[in-house]
Image (tube, rainbow, N blue to C red):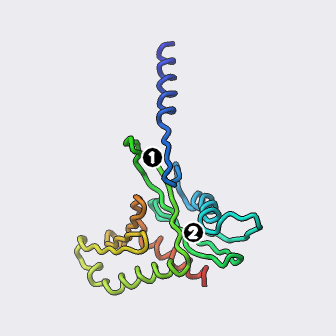
């Protein structure tokens, strides 16, 4: 009986003190996929991008691609009524509380259409201009640049990879997911 009571008390205390209060604007999550990103992304687009309104507002939102790591998901949105469209990057990863407790969190970064197209063009320009450098036989060649609030690191590791650093997140955007995102976004907004 003492063992059961001890285990029960341990579980109650663990669950009670394991809760983390976070006022940083991040969201807690246990798993992240295109479906979860789409579900949570709708709230983000309504509240942070288009703005909550008493009038009926119609908009479209579609998941484009998710990195195989699950750390980065892309969504495209379009609201003809408010003349707004763009790309939402969904970041997911492990964060640390002030108490040193690890937890999973996600956050969204909005890039309006022109900014998103500029990002894709900048990446493509750097890949083209520096193809000899990045495609060399050395695996030690890296290049990075800052775009808006994002820092992008491009390197080779069994193919071209892009790491995106933003707001404490470090997410890998492998080449296939990046190309799918770029191709689908351009098709959706043109």
- Reading the image, the residue beneath label 1 is 103
Q: Residues within 10 Å of mark 2 (few under 14, many from 20)?
A: many
- From the viewer's perspective, tell me whether residue 113 is left or right of residue 3: right
Q: Residues within 10 Å of mark 1 (few under 14, many from 20)?
A: some
Front-most of 159 and 165? 165
- Reading the image, the residue beneath label 2 is 75
- From the viewer's perspective, tell me whether residue 152 is left or right of residue 63: left
Q: Is residue 48 above or below residue 79?
A: above
Q: Please name the residue shown 32% across and 73% down the image.
A: 144
Give the percent coordinates (x, y) of residue 75: 57, 69
Q: CA distance from mark 2 to mark 1?
A: 24 Å
Q: State the residue lying farthest toward the top.
A: 1
- From the viewer's perspective, tell me whether residue 140 is left or right of residue 174: left
Q: Is residue 41 visible?
A: yes
Give the percent coordinates (x, y) of residue 47: 63, 62
Front-most of 119 and 63? 119
Mark 1 falls on what kind of element?
Answer: strand
Instruction: Give me the disc on residue 80.
Output: none
Mark 2 falls on what kind of element?
Answer: strand
Give the percent coordinates (x, y) of residue 180: 51, 75
């Amino acid at each position: 009986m003492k063992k059961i009571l001890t285990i029960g008390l341990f579980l109650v205390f663990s669950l009670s003190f394991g809760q983390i209060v976070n006022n940083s604007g991040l969201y807690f999550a246990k798993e992240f996929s295109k479906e979860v990103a789409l579900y949570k992304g709708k709230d983000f687009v309504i509240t942070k991008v288009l703005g909550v309104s008493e009038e009926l507002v119609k908009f479209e939102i579609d998941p484009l691609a998710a990195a195989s790591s699950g750390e980065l998901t892309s969504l495209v949105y379009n609201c003809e009524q408010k003349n707004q469209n763009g790309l939402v990057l969904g970041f997911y990863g492990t964060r640390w509380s002030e108490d040193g407790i690890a937890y999973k969190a996600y956050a969204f970064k909005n890039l309006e259409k022109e900014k998103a197209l500029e990002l894709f063009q900048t990446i493509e320009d750097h890949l083209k201009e520096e193809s000899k450098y990045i495609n060399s036989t050395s695996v030690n060649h890296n290049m990075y640049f800052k775009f808006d609030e994002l820092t992008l690191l491009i390197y080779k590791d069994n193919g071209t990879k892009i790491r995106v650093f933003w707001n404490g997140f470090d997410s890998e955007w492998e080449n296939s997911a990046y190309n799918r995102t770029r191709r689908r976004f351009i098709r959706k907004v043109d």
